[in-house]
Amino acid sequence: MVVGESQSLLRVRGPLEFRCLLDSKDVSLLQKEISTTFQKLHSQLKSEACALMACDSPIIIWPNRGFHATPGEITPDMLCDDIHQWILSDEEENTGMRSAKKKNKKGSTTTVIDIRLMTEVTQPGPLPAPILCKKSQKAHFLSTTLPMDCVVSTTCKDSIKHAFGALLEGLIHQLHDMEKVMLQHTKGTTVLVPEPMHFLLPEPKGLVTAVFPSGVADSQLETLRKELHQQFDLPEDWPYFRRVSAYRFPNETYKDGYLRNPHRVLTHPSLDQGKVNLVRGIYSYHHYMQDHIDDNGWGCAYRSLQTICSWFKQQGYVERSVPTHREIQQALVDVGDKEPSFVGSRQWIGSIEVQNVLNQSLGVTSKIMFVSQGSELASKGRELTNHFLSEGTPVMIGGGVLAHTILGVAWSETTGQIRYLILDPHYTGAEDLGVITDKGWCGWKGPDFWDQTAYYNLCLPQRPKGI
């Protein structure tokens, strides 16, 4: 499924209780018992007791009961887009008033409808008398919760019946994947709980779900990732399926407070026969005055370096946190580039220092592009295009007393026209996406953005090739 314009993601989550009596040490019998338990869960999903409830709304749908739904106005042919009118915001819940469709925040073209997986525990009519049985034996009883998490993408033309049917099919398929993972990672009576995660792949594949064994580090799952790359016909030089690369839904926020990928809300420039090539993956926007540090006037290159480091962390290439100003300075002392007195100072750094810190702290190599004067940057379209095509990493550019981050380039090989996508670390305000993009702190710039007579050095980080 592809996450595109004017789409809704239906995301169903809920627990399925996995209870299994492992009364044998024979591996084949244990696996058979696990598979039998999964068959029972499949039957549970296919039973009339299975129900899907749209969160923050009165909508409940029983997909296996002839598409029975409540309230009565919900019909199978109703469009998914109409679900929004039934969903109440927190404010509306307090007032008891229902509004029309929710408006998205700037840049969000995809909305998420959260759905809860439920199972009726009672049936209508008289209940039979309970029957109790007691059996004494020594056995290993396994009880855990399977965290079901399934997503389907819908358009305004999709019916509720079609979408909820796809959700149910997705849940059933996810159970198959969970069974496979659990059987592969069962050792004796120790079972690892399967963990579903979502990943946004290049178009046309879009959003897909993969199941991982919880508690197993990414470094031990390379074989599984290779299988996924083969399944989805992906190249083996980019880490599409590392946990840190999991898709972040539009209604999920980052707890660290940094904005991610503010450039995504921008409109690309239109150049005659021009092509746009951008940074790949996720990065955090680091700028002046963050982290309770007043670096206004001297810390722009530090902030650009932090943005680059965040990119390597959020693609899963490194595990260490984004370095602080002091840690950056200490790395330069450790590598022999600066004297010990440099630590704690307010001295500037440039592209060469950024290259040294990336190598010292992250083990990342970089290429340096030297430009004797800013007017020459207009002729560097091919080099920058090749960088974003092959590496996809943010580029730090320093010249004079200023440093910026280049996130992409629009370039016409025919006419030579060029535009640069700039992330400006000199911003001192709050993490307001509208202000940052409307005021050009993240935006497309022409060749006249650079001082035409100043020299510039560009640091082009090289990413590791692997999954």
Image: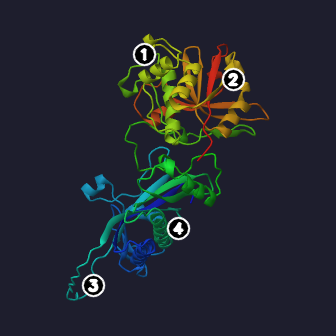
Viewer-closest of 268 and 184? 184
The amino acid pointed to by label 4 is Asp
Give the CA distance from mark 2 to mark 3.
75 Å
On the image, the x and y values in percent for residue 25 come to: 38, 71
Tell which of 192 and 292 is nearer to you. Answer: 192
* Amino acid under disc 1: Val
For mark 1, what is the residue? 343
- Identify the secondary structure beneath mark 1: loop
Label 3 amino acid?
Answer: Pro
Q: Nearer the viewer, mark 2 or mark 1?
A: 1
Residue 133 image point, x, y percent: 22, 84
Give the class, few, some or many, for how many residues have Cα within 10 Å of label 1's Cα (few <14, many ≥20).
some
Disc 3: which residue? 124
First in residue order: circle 1 vs circle 4: 4
- The crowd level at tag 4 (other Cα within 10 Å; few <14, some 14-19, many 20+) is some
Q: Amino acid at mark 2?
A: Leu
Cα separation between marks 2 and 1 = 33 Å
> Which is nearer the N-term, disc 4 or disc 3?
3
